[in-house]
Structures are given as C-alpha cells and as structure tokens.
Image (cartoon, rainbow, N blue to C red):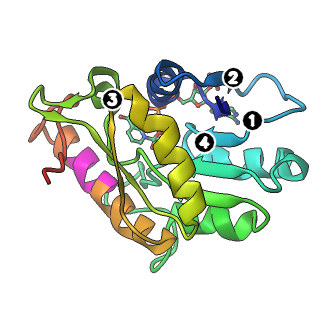
C-alpha cells in the first residue's frame, strides 16, 4: 500500500483519488486553505497549472526523493489558442527543472475526469492513462499502483513525451469546448 498525497480535490483530484483508493492505497488530500507537514510517497498535482509553482515553493523541503505526478494541461485559457509553457517544453519538464530532487511523471492529462470516474471513454473503450517520465521506476510505481483499479496504464516514453501529451490534452479540451465531443468522451487507445 502506498501513501498518496493529492493536491486538489476537484474533478480530477477526487476521480484519481477514488481510483487509487480502489486499488488499495491510502489517499490524503491537500487543498489551498491548509499547509501540511508530511507528504506521501507519491504526490499528485491535481490543481490548475497556475497553482503549481507556489505549491512546489511551499513544499520544496519535503519533495526530495518523491514521485510527482503532473496531470496539468497548461492551457492559455485567456485565448484558448495555445499553452502557457515555453515552446519546446512542457509543464512536466518545467516542474522537473524546478524540483530536480524529485522524479516527475506526466499522467492523466489526456483523460477527462468523467472517464476516470466511469473507467470508460464514451461508454465504449476502457480508459487508458498514458505515462511519460525519464524514470522507469517511477512509471512502474504509478502503473502498479493504478492498474488494480481497472484503468489501463501505458508507458508513453520519456518525460519529453509530455509535450505531445499536453498537446493532445489541449486539443481534446478544444474539441469539447467546441462541442465536437462530449466531456465523457475523448481520446481512447486501442491496442
Ligand atoms: N477536468 C478534467 O477533465 C481534466 C482533465 C485532464 C487534466 N486536467 C487538469 O487537472 C487539473 C485540475 O483540474 P480540475 O478539473 O480537477 O479542477 P477543479 O475541479 O477546479 O479543482 C481544482 C482543485 O485545485 C485546488 N487548488 C487550487 N490551488 C491550490 C493550491 N495552491 N493548493 C492545493 N490545492 C489547490 C482546488 O482546491 P481549493 O478549493 O482548496 O482551492 C480544487 O480542489 C488542472 O491542471 C487541469 O488542467 C483536468
């Protein structure tokens, strides 16, 4: 059993927490109104990308050696026309540069919250969580912790692949906002 700390108990945080709990892990949530003095083995950033920098700064001394799961889609919501991270980078890589003492895994950002709740995309395909990280051990940790929940977990490659995952997440959001797909749908992966 792993101890998992999830920052944010909104749509994504609660859906991800439920899956980890279902898989037998201990989940603790941290909101914006309180600061805690211990963190789990795995930390999930289920908060808006704009909130990430202050969380990393506040918890810097506690992050050494931890696996940080970044689920954010750093969309420029002012324009809905791109991402706020530098070209040729990603939110996950920015986080990894900010906290080099931790290991970052990009995950969940291509899954709408409803598909993590139902474990299905549009009621048709099993929801697949794509992982990107430079650490095979960290990907194995997330995968082994999550797979018993019934979600499919795939290794999407190095942390650099977070660029493509964030582009996919952005595209999926724009498809939903423009009414081309529903928020219970989105990208599915078929082997
Ligand atoms: N919704 C989706 O389908 C979806 C899909 C893929 C990825 N994502 C990504 O997932 C992240 C969360 O999205 P969401 O839809 O779950 O948002 P949400 O429902 O609005 O929830 C955001 C949560 O973040 C918390 N939060 C904000 N600032 C915080 C801080 N400084 N410390 C701790 N908690 C803080 C809020 O808690 P308080 O109320 O305590 O402030 C709230 O519970 C975003 O980065 C989004 O891009 C979302």
Residue located at (66% from left, 42% from top): 42
Residue located at (40% from left, 27% from top): 149
Quadrant of res 120: top left
Label 4 or label 2, whichever comes before in sequence order:
2
Q: Which residue is mark 1?
A: 40
| Label ID, residue 45 | 4
Is residue 115 visible to the viewer in this orientation of the structure? yes
Disc 3 within 8 angstroms of ligand 1 (CB): no
Q: Which residue is mark 2?
A: 28
What SS does tag 1 mark?
loop
Label 3 or label 2, whichever comes before in sequence order:
2
Label 4 or label 1, whichever comes before in sequence order:
1
Q: Quadrant of the C terminus?
A: bottom left
Q: Which residue is mark 3?
A: 150
Asked if the residue at tag 4 contacts the one at tag 3, i.e. Cβ–Cβ closer than 8 Å, the answer is no
- Residues drawn in magenta: 169-174
């Amino acid at each position: 059993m792993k101890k998992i700390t999830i920052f944010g108990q909104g749509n994504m945080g609660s859906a991800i927490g439920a899956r980890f709990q279902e898989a037998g892990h201990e989940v603790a949530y941290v909101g914006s109104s309180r600061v805690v003095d211990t963190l789990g083995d795995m930390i999930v950033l289920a908060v808006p990308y704009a909130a990430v920098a202050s969380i990393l700064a506040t918890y810097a001394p506690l992050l050494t050696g931890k696996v940080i799961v970044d689920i954010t889609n750093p969309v420029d919501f002012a324009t809905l026309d791109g991402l706020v991270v530098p070209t040729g980078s990603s939110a996950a890589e920015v986080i990894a540069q900010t906290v080099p003492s931790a290991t970052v895994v990009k995950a969940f950002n291509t899954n709408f919250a409803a598909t993590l709740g139902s474990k299905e995309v549009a009621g048709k395909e099993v929801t697949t969580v794509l992982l990107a990280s430079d650490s095979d051990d960290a990907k194995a940790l997330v995968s082994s912790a999550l797979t018993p929940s019934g979600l499919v977990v795939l290794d999407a490659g190095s942390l650099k692949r977070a660029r493509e995952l964030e582009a996919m997440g952005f595209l999926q959001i724009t498809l939903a906002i423009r009414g081309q797909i529903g928020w219970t749908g989105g990208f599915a992966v078929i082997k």
